[in-house]
Amino acid sequence: MTRTSVPVTDDGIPAATQIASELRRLVRGAVWAPADDGYDQARAVWNGAVQHRPAVVVRCAEDTDVRTALLAARSHALPISVRGGGHDWAGRAIRDGGVVIDLSALRAVRVDASAAVARIEGGVLAGDLLDTAAAHGLATPAGAVRGVGMTGMSMAGGYGGLIGRFGLALDNLLSAEVVLADGSTVVAGPDDDRDLHWALRGGGGNFGVVTSARFRLHPLGQVLGGMVMYPLELARQVLRGYQEIVATGPDELTVMAGLLTGPDGAPVVFLAPTWSGDLADGEAAVAPLTRLGAPLMTSIQAMPYPELLRLFEAGSAAGNGYALDTHWLPELTDEAIAALLEAAVGRTSPRSLLALHQFHGAAARVPEGTTAFALRRPHLLAEVIAAWTPDEDGERHRTWLREATATLAPGALPGGYPNILSTSDGARAEAGFADNADRLRAAKRRYDPDGVFAAVAALAA
């Protein structure tokens, strides 16, 4: 991996040393430069294959630290990145030679149960918000695991088990407090800075630093969920049956599917339902998923929604190497099923998996153009995840990823989900924005005319 050299000032002092010294005098939070103890831990993210070396990491202790770090980076002409939850596979949060504005210490969650609204700080994880909301009998849509940063996920989409009933995570983003590139702060919502509020809901972290956000909450008790596993030889009939079930299923039933490594080391097909309606109706709604053949394992039970998100945590441990790619599939055709099976059989690591995330119901009824997230027709988000241990060379696993994704491309919809695309895949990101691309670029020119924030290449100013 090529490392970016750290700039040197006119008097020969490394810029990292100078800006770190300056920031230590100005911020309440912690500051690390490359020579400091703790620097390697401070620059680490979920994906252990990301080894970027920033000039400085600033772990902000309050909102004013964000503004201070941002303006200091700009005065030293250093690139900027923002670390929220740190569940970062592509290295967006940690830029080589740059200043990392680290929000991970800002984890406060406040719930107004009577208004069904939560206010969270910029470093809050999905699990933080869901646990606090659940204590009040409330919930909001999140992703598939607890450790993802809530604001970062929501600014691109947020597929998950509640999508059919309550929409994407971004559909529930009521407002956001944002520090812009010039150091000013705005509150983007339906009443003020409406263009920014629109852009944040799908345009990703391209417009500023979200230091706090408000999310709509929904009454929700226990959900019915878990996993059903089938042997690989039943994959075709199981996945065909899955397609038929989800095509006509109610909003309350959202089902993730895919292929992973089973307990005996062989690939298996899995179905992971979430039923968010009345539990008395849930067993009948979920039962067809268990009758698509002879399951290897069925584990479905009532549980709090936050607990359901622990299902895939064991397979997404921090520190392993990861590479991801994606396609949007309009439906699960026989050709797509064949591509998934070929990839599963040829996987280069038992940790790798292929997942299908359902988009339907409430999320599909949001009128196009309401948010920057453009794809509002029912579809499946196909996620290909290559994973390997820290002691392995990742190249053969990345090769598998590229080949697996290529076999899924025929018949896929244009573009792709920005949270899973790489930082260099601007053409596909732009195609995914469709008719919203021009409006997004206009918002970029208005709120970040100098191109300080660069989470998605398609939105370069």
Image (cartoon, rainbow, N blue to C red):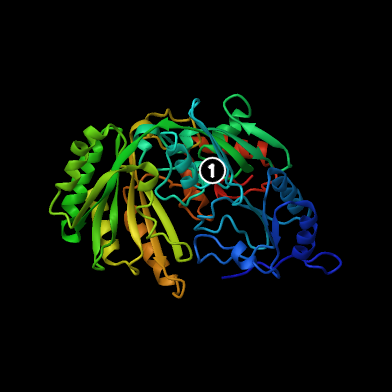
* Quadrant position of the C terminus in the picture: top right
Percent x, y for residue 106?
61, 47
* Quadrant position of the N terminus in the picture: bottom right
- Identified by mark 1, the residue type is Thr
Percent x, y for residue 49?
50, 66
Which residue lies under the disc numbered 1? 151
Is 144 left, or right, of 430 in this rendering?
A: left
Any part of residue 296 in sight: yes
**Residue at image point 36% right, 42% down:** 304
Secondary structure beneath disc 1?
Answer: helix
**Residue at image point 43% right, 46% down:** 415
Residue 285 drawn above or below residue 3: above
Which one is nearer the viewer's eye here, 429 or 5?
5
Quadrant of residue 135 within the rendered picture: top left
Residue 304 drawn above or below residue 136: below
Any part of residue 332 in sight: no
**Residue at image point 64% right, 48% down:** 453
Percent x, y for residue 314?
38, 60
Residue 231 drawn above or below residue 272: below
Percent x, y for residue 88?
51, 56
